[in-house]
Image: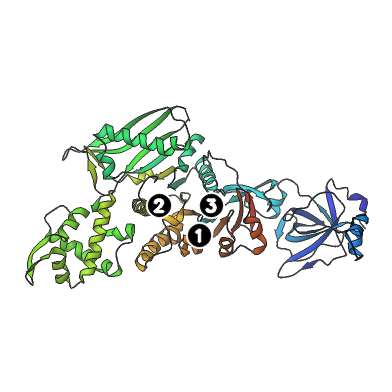
């Protein structure tokens, strides 16, 4: 028999009571603790129940405070009577949800209830993580926490690399901590996983600040023809590139950069005298951050993307996709000009040598007649050619400079890569992102085959910008190509994707199906309901503290609360 005197509240806080039933069923496991110890016992707090050689991990599900008059159902006829009756507390009853049952360090879901009068105590440091069977290795998400945001001391939550490769969705309102979490993950991967390439798609400028944590950056910078027109030569182009980058990534965030030294690596072509600028190396002198930046100018050429134009625009109709290659072959055969997007557009919309019904036909009308294709199909191709040309990201040369695609073998080697997208038009952003993701997929095939430890982790903040709900069947087909390759097929190539958004309603539905780990920060009630968060948890997450996340993953036996704190330098 247990002596009540041993419940001194310094270690043990209560006993499993006989006054209420202890029940373990297929639906759940519930017991009740009686206590006279001071303390709040907040909902969600972890406690340990000792029952002989068996230990149970329990969470506080309900806390009841009553006095003796309440138990006796003594009527209160007036406010004066209520106040005149002295409050006489009885022991408090705490409803506990059993989470796991452990014998000799082996933990499993509860299958039997603890015995009556089993002692209940506070957990020791690290004990909760062990009883939850949390992974010991992986990318650090944060500290185990209660729904209130209070940390469970000494218990870290890590996401195994294998779970990361099954992809992650992070959802939360603006300011809830999404970017902080993604930057923490990037820093952990770069610092502690030497075989990882981390690629951050950055539309705002937040992801460059890992430089202040001693991380070297490789930055892909899209360059358009308009940018070259403002430069008066190679040196002026490089100077403008550096100035624009430093302003957008640092000074606009209030980070004082006073002195930067830079040099560029380029090659002058004999045939046309143009200089291809491959890299620009930046060294920060005031202040000194112990790391550097390599800017990598990025542009496309018609030759490289002409036959894959739908994959980077989603503009071609199904009919146009069927005949697109034939049309391009006809243009190549009939045209004498350069086969660029502008050249193809000009040729298709120019008068031909053929007349019909007393008017000269345009070249696209002749091709439409000869191939037996409706003119609207050719007009769709023409609009796509014009859009690609007017994006300005294709065939970028001028002022003695030519910008091309980078050598991805160098860009995607282990380390940290940022795709710099602030100030870039939305269409150009999507073209650049889809092309880079396609190159990541191609690069990681042989790379992962040579070394199974190699991983590429793609961080897609504002994911709804690049993988939105499709507005048409043609756009849907394009998005499905990218999502299928990147996630389903990419997993076998060591590719992991972390999607983050504050508007999941605008995010492609396939993303929700393809992500096996959901990390949910402060969100609206409707968002939480759509993501399958139980109603019992929603009240905490609608008003959660910044950085408090509810995590569901096959890597964990139970959903967890995690407190995310900034480890990487973060501004904004």
Residue at 29% of width from left, 58% of height from top?
Answer: 309
The one of 3 and 293 positioned closer to us in this rendering: 293
The image shows residue 471, relative to residue 220, as above or below, that is below
How crowded pointer 2 is (Cα within 10 Å; few <14, some 14-19, many 20+) is rated as many
244 to the left or right of 66 = left
Q: Which residue is mark 3?
A: 161
For label 1, count other residues whose C-alpha is less than 10 Å away and answer few (under 14), some (14-19) or many (20+): many
Q: Nearer the viewer, mark 1 or mark 2?
A: 1
Determine contact: label 2, label 3, CB under 8 Å: no
Of 505 and 440, the residue lying toward us: 505
Residue at numbered disc 1:
504
Quadrant in the picture for the N terminus: bottom right
Q: Quadrant of residue 233?
A: top left
Please tell me which residue lies in front, 74 or 142: 74
Could you tell me which secondary element the residue under label 1 belongs to? helix
Say which label, 2 or 3, has the lower sequence index.
Answer: 3
Which residue lies under the disc numbered 2?
Answer: 444
């Amino acid at each position: 028999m247990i002596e009540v005197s041993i419940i001194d509240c310094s270690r043990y806080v209560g006993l499993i009571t006989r006054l209420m039933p202890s029940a373990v069923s297929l639906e759940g496991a519930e017991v009740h603790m009686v206590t006279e110890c001071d303390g709040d016992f907040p909902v969600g707090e972890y406690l340990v129940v000792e029952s002989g050689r068996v230990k149970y991990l329990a969470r506080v599900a309900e806390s009841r405070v009553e006095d003796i008059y309440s138990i006796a159902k003594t009527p209160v006829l007036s406010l004066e009577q209520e106040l005149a009756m002295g409050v006489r507390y009885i022991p408090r009853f705490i409803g506990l949800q059993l989470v796991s049952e452990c014998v000799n360090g082996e933990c499993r879901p509860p299958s039997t209830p603890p015995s009556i009068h089993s002692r209940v105590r506070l957990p020791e440091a690290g004990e909760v993580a062990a009883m939850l069977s949390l992974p010991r290795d992986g990318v650090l998400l944060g500290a185990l926490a209660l729904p209130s945001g209070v940390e469970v001391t000494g218990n870290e939550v890590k996401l195994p690399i294998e779970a990361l490769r099954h992809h992650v969705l992070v959802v939360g309102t603006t300011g809830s901590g999404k970017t902080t979490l993604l930057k923490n993950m990037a820093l952990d991967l770069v610092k502690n996983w030497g075989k990882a390439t981390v690629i951050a798609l950055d539309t705002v400028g937040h992801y460059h600040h890992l430089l202040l944590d001693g991380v070297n950056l490789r930055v892909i910078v899209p360059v358009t023809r308009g940018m070259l027109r403002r430069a008066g030569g190679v040196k002026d182009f490089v100077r403008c590139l550096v100035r624009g980058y430093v302003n957008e990534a640092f000074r606009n965030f209030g980070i004082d950069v006073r002195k930067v030294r830079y040099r560029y690596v380029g090659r002058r072509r004999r045939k046309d005298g143009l200089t291809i600028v491959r890299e620009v190396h930046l060294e920060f002198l005031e202040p000194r951050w112990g790391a550097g930046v390599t800017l990598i100018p990025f542009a496309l050429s018609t030759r490289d993307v002409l036959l894959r134009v739908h994959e980077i625009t989603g503009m071609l109709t199904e009919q146009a996709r069927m005949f697109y290659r034939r049309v391009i072959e006809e243009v190549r055969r009939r045209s004498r000009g350069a086969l660029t997007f502008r050249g193809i557009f000009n040729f298709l919309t120019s008068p031909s040598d053929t007349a019909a019904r007393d008017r000269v036909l345009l070249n696209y009308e002749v091709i439409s007649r000869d191939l037996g294709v409706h003119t609207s199909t050719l007009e769709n191709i023409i609009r796509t050619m014009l859009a690609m040309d007017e994006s300005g990201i294709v065939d970028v040369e001028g002022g003695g400079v030519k910008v091309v695609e980078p050598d991805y073998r160098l860009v995607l080697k282990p380390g940290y890569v940022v795709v710099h997208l602030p100030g870039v038009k939305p269409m150009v952003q999507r073209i650049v992102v889809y092309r880079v993701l396609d190159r990541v997929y191609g690069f990681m095939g042989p790379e992962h085959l040579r070394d199974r430890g190699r991983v590429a982790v793609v961080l897609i903040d504002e994911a709804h910008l690049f993988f939105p709900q499709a507005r048409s069947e043609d756009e849907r087909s394009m998005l499905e190509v990218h999502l299928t390759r990147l996630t389903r097929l990419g997993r076998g190539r060591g590719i992991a994707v972390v999607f983050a958004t504050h508007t999941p309603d605008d995010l492609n539905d396939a993303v929700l199906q393809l992500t096996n780990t959901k990390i949910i920060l402060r969100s609206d009630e409707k968002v939480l309901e759509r993501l399958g968060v139980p109603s019992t948890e929603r009240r905490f997450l609608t008003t959660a503290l910044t950085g408090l996340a509810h995590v569901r993953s096959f890597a964990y036996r139970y959903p967890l609360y995690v407190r995310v704190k900034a480890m990487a330098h973060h501004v904004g």
